[in-house]
Image (tube, rainbow, N blue to C red):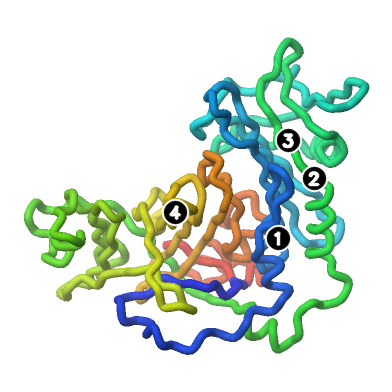
Amino acid sequence: MAALTLPWALLLGLAALPASAAPPPEMPRFLRQLDRAVHAGDWTLQCNSGQFCQIIGVVRPPRDHIGVRTVVMIERGPAAGAAPRLRLAFLDSLGALAVPPPEDHWRLIARGLMRREALPLGLGPVEADGAYRASPEATPAIIAALRRWPGAAVHNGERVIARMPRGDLDRLMRRMDRLQHPGTDPLTPEERVQWLQEYHYTVLRGSAAEPVEGLAPDAVEAACPGRALANRPFLYSIGPQHRLWIAECPDGNHVFLQPDGADPIHFEMRDTVTGKIRRHDYAGVGGDGLLMLQLPGEGGRSDCGRVVRFGWTGSAFAMIREQRYARCRGVPHQFWPRVWYPTSWRYAEAPPSDGGNAPPAAGEVSLPAKNKGGIHHD
């Protein structure tokens, strides 16, 4: 999989990276441009190292907590002539999914124009994360209208159903064009070798296990600073020879990896440039068998920041996915832009059945070379 080298990493043990370690070489300017989020009003453009770009737009939660907000998500791959995909989700002021399923008579109406304009939404059935995908036929017209109209709202013919984001979407779309199609190669061959690398590994899924009362390791029991007691720790089996302990403490969750017959090892998020530990809040293993860590945003808020998922390879945790959104607007993290994930999953509606070209299991046939760099899930 192609990966953009990140300014921080998940490292085993507090001494895994000395604070005096030499900083990495400066990231090429083009990769810095791709990695940087750009705002225009309520809209945010975020690309990744594969030049896959996403735009998310949502208004601030209303102070009176009245009204529904539309989260608009536009994404497009870098291939010449690639069509954008458009998804909408509807949230209340607290960030919970709101309103009943959209109906056929819902329209997108213009605001701030002298004459009334309206477009059908053409939304499909609800998807797994609670969003609705606009049809390929409706998508170009809706995006063109949002680029041109001063404002918009979702209307059912009688009243406004949901507010739409405002701002200069056209400027972000034009910037996306420049980043995805720069004309000449913005990276030298040496920079591509250094910064865009492929990793091949098998990911072992984690599964919840029931901890035996009183048998948690001493290090896990004493995880909380200031002699605070941890809540009953969560325990996960991760691969055939390791266990993962997660202790809930007032300062956040603490994660320990315990090989069979050995003492647990404490995980920390450490900045690879400054050597400083990055605090995370939630940590846990989800239904996908991946370890998820949430790094809070400004002011320690959990509705912005970063969410990172790691898979256990049998000897280390490898990052599988990172999502980042710096604007604290009550948007659930499943809608945040994805800034890192396997290249073979980049344009897939769903991950490939075996994830890519990792060595197949006995009797299993690997996928063709076009999926190079994927991940195999056991």
The local secondary structure at tag 1 comes to: loop
Q: Measured from the top left, where is residue 323 in percent x and y?
A: 54, 56
The local secondary structure at tag 3 comes to: strand
Q: Nearer the viewer, residue 286 or 367?
A: 286
Q: CA distance from mark 2 to mark 3?
A: 21 Å
Q: CA distance from mark 1 to mark 2?
A: 20 Å
Q: Say if mark 2 contacts mark 3, CB within 8 Å.
A: no
Question: Which numbered disc covers residue 296?
Answer: 4
Q: Which is more foreground, mark 4 or mark 3? A: 4
Q: Amino acid at mark 3?
A: Ala
Q: Quadrant of residue 36?
A: bottom right
**Local crowd at mark 1 within 10 Å, few (<14), some, or many (≥20)?**
many
Q: Which residue is mark 1?
A: 52
Q: Which is more foreground, mark 2 or mark 3? A: 2
The local secondary structure at tag 2 comes to: loop
Which of disc 3 and disc 1 is earlier in sequence? 1
Which of disc 4 and disc 2 is earlier in sequence? 2
Quick check: 210 above or below 308? Answer: above
Q: Measured from the top left, where is residue 207 in percent x and y?
A: 31, 54
Q: Measured from the top left, where is residue 242 in percent x and y?
A: 26, 68
Q: Amino acid at mark 4?
A: Pro
Q: CA distance from mark 4 to mark 3?
A: 31 Å
Q: Amino acid at mark 1?
A: Phe
Q: CA distance from mark 2 to mark 4?
A: 28 Å
**Local crowd at mark 2 within 10 Å, few (<14), some, or many (≥20)?**
some
Which of disc 3 and disc 2 is earlier in sequence? 3
Which of disc 4 and disc 1 is earlier in sequence? 1
Q: Which residue is mark 3?
A: 134
Q: Nearer the viewer, residue 281 or 246?
A: 281
Q: Say if mark 2 contacts mark 4, CB within 8 Å.
A: no
**Local crowd at mark 3 within 10 Å, few (<14), some, or many (≥20)?**
many
**Local crowd at mark 4 within 10 Å, few (<14), some, or many (≥20)?**
many
